[in-house]
Image (cartoon, rainbow, N blue to C red):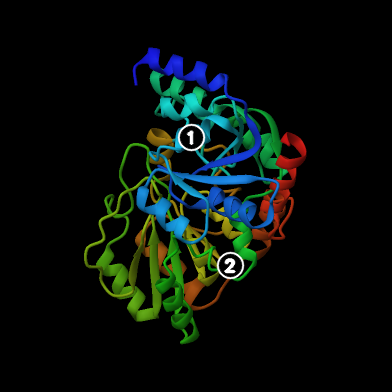
Amino acid sequence: MEQHEITRLKEVVASIPKQKNLAIFFGRAGGSFIDNVKYFFLHCVQHQPQLECYFISFDKKEAASLHAQGLPAVWVNEPEAPALMAKAGLVICDDFSWKNQEFLWALTEQAVSIQLWHGIPLKAIGFPEIESTVNMNPAKAAHLTFSYSGYDTVVSTSPFFTENAFARAFKADAFVESGYPRNDVLHRRPSKLDMINTDSNLYGELVRFRKQGGKTVFYMPTFRDNGGGPFEDGAIDIMRLSHFCQQHNVAFLCKFHPYIPVKTGTLPPNVIMVSPQSDAYPLLPLCDALITDYSSIYFDFLHVDRPIIFYAYDLAKYMAVNRELLFDFDTMTPGHKATTQDELYSAIENIVVNNNDSFANDRNKLKELSFSNIDGNSAKRLAEHIISTYL
């Protein structure tokens, strides 16, 4: 749309009365039905009749699929979608892909905005990232300044991370330490709705594999702002990995960041690629150990209380050319550190195959620091905050 059309649209939207309890939900990474928005949306639809909820999907098939399961979902290009967004009193999101689309922002700018975000940050995000000299330029700084500003409420998980991460990263009126809705599923057996956009066949395969004595390892690294990754960088040789996993009866599941497109092709035995745009949270309780680098997933995995291996093969380079870290890496990562393939396989054999877990106390300390509540009721707390504050 031309700028004068955007200006006129904003004027029209400003004249439309807002329905305080009408909440629209935007998914993450281009609108995917995953992460905090997924679980908070499901909670509100099922348990909060005070709210009238709609998930706005950027994918027509996804919207139809959700609608077929009895969920109020609307494709963003349906004729009724603009009117719905224009009168919404609440916008709920866990990134800002929607906010960076001028048309959507013009329709929703005056609604109360609730930013769930998508992880406790180890790496710099928001204003600490903007203020960093690493991988920053004026255009990117301006884009991030807009994206991380103007929220009514940002979700946090504890006073420590409110003070040291979220309040530094975001410009917002309030921070609520409700915890993350996506962590609630780690405290219950996943329901049919929880399994939406989760590989249910893989779930069953993992249950059977573990019952037969196999061990499962999830590898979930973050993305590199300037490209690259463990396979591209030669940090993992997939054939050597497959041989090792067959030898030790280990299933190795790779789940990459939603921003990273993955072409699987034919994979060797015992190596499984999980779709980056799918929801892995119902699978995490079936995981005997997590391998990651600088991804926020390891904070969530503290709820599962199983070993974490940090494969930081490119730590110095990552901090020099991609992103600074908010915290000291060694003190904030309760698990074995590996920097080479030999060290990685030795760690898996020692920790997963031989069941040597020496970091349980360290994980528990970080869990208590990271989460004010560890009870599976984060979505309920957040809903109560929104209803009491904005309705």
The single residue placed furthest to the right in the displayed view is 388
Q: Quadrant of the N terminus?
A: top left
Give the residue pinned by disc 2. 306
Residue 337's x, y, as percent? 49, 57
Q: At numbered mark 1, what does the secondary structure look like: helix, strand or loop?
A: loop
| 52 versus 10 height, above or below | below
Give the residue pinned by disc 1. 96
Location of residue 360 (image quadrant): bottom right
Q: Amino acid at mark 2?
A: Arg
- Residue 119 visible to the viewer: no
- Residue 163 visible to the viewer: yes
Residue in the image at 50% along x and 39% along y:
95
Whether residue 375 sits left or right of residue 76 in the image: it is: right
Mark 2, other Cα within 10 Å: few <14 / some 14–19 / many ≥20: some
Q: At numbered mark 2, what does the secondary structure look like: helix, strand or loop?
A: loop
The single residue placed furthest to the left in the displayed view is 266
The single residue placed furthest to the top in the displayed view is 4
Q: Which residue is more in the foreground, 190 or 210?
A: 190
| 169 versus 23 height, above or below | above
Q: Which residue is more in the foreground, 280 or 33?
A: 33
Q: Which residue is more in the foreground, 387 or 188?
A: 387
Tell me, for residue 358, which label it has, or none: none
Whether residue 246 sits left or right of residue 162 in the image: it is: left
Residue 219's x, y, as percent? 42, 61
Residue 100's x, y, as percent? 43, 29
Q: Which residue is more in the foreground, 61 or 176?
A: 61
Q: Quadrant of the C terminus?
A: top right
Q: Tell us which disc is closer to us: 1 or 2.
A: 1
Whether residue 210 sits left or right of residue 233 in the image: it is: right
Q: Amino acid at mark 1?
A: Phe
